[in-house]
Image (tube, grey):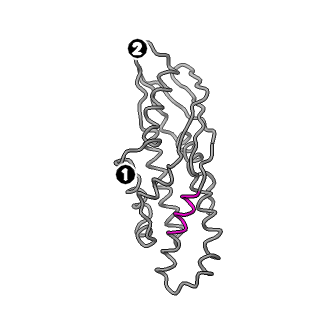
Amino acid sequence: MVTTKMKRAWFALIAIVAALALGFTLSGCAGESDEELITKAIDNEMSIIVEPDDETIQMLADEATAGAGSTFETMGIDSAELVKSWIDGFGYSIGTITVDGDTATVEMTITSKQLGPVMMDWQANFEENATSQGFTSMDEIYAYAGETIMDELNNASPVETSVEVAVNKDGNDWVFDQGAGNQTALMDAMIGDYSL
């Protein structure tokens, strides 16, 4: 059904966003503290999501489309517009950085529209609203689903989520831990509760 394919699309989106955000090295410069280097590198790299270029938007859109199969096309959803709406209002702040030898933890507050609650709100209202429309074909129902999903996402407000991420030192460079902990932190912030 629609929600299963949409769920796969959201997870494809979050996977590529996590790869963008976590797949960077925090390179050191002489004279700066570890905390300064970590902060500067996070600022440089998070700009990929805060101020994405057209190539990043298209990459995220392609991932969403791949995860959804033909569902977006059937529903009339432009995946690039979906991505733009989702990351609209995305932001972050860096809190306490605790360095312990070659490891560090970074407390962050991520501000993002959470896709889980958006989709749960949409699903809670969709069946009743679609039934009241008096549609006569599946094409009309799918088009209405796409329109209402985009309305729900466009009208969603970003929420703040506190997360903690791990960073490891490799020589003179700081690198995000590629483990499940950091990925889960980003998913908590950007997807939230998604128990469809």
| Image x and y of residue 77, in percent | 44, 66
Residue 9: give its label.
none
Report x, y in % for residue 53. Answer: 37, 45
Q: Which residue type carries mark 1?
A: Met
Where in the figure is residue 17, as x and y percent of width and height? 46, 47
Name the quarter where the C terminus is drawn: bottom right
Disc 2 marks which amino acid?
Answer: Ala
In the depicted structure, whether residue 139 falls above or below residue 147: below
Residue under the point 44% across and 58% down: 81
Residue named by callout 2: 30
Q: In the rendered structure, which disc, 1 or 2, sits on the residue that comes first in sequence?
A: 2
Q: Quadrant of residue 25?
A: top left
Check disc 1 and report its element: helix, strand or loop.
helix
* Dominant secondary structure, magenta: helix
* Residue pictured at 58% horizontal, 52% vertical: 114
Highlighted range, magenta? 147-155
Q: Give the percent coordinates (x, y) of residue 134.
A: 58, 85
Q: Would residue 115 appear left or right of 81 to someone viewing this image?
A: right
Residue name at image x 47 percent, y 45 percent: 18
Say whether residue 144 is left or right of residue 66: right
Please determine whether, in this image, residue 99 is positioned above or below residue 120.
above
Find the distance from the CA under tag 1 to the CA under tag 2.
35 Å
97 in relation to 2, above or below = above
8 or 53, which lies in front? 53
Q: Is residue 93 left or right of residue 64?
A: right
Instruction: Identify residue for label 1.
Output: 59
Residue found at the far top of this picture:
31
Q: Secondary structure at mark 2?
A: loop
Q: Residue furthest left?
A: 55
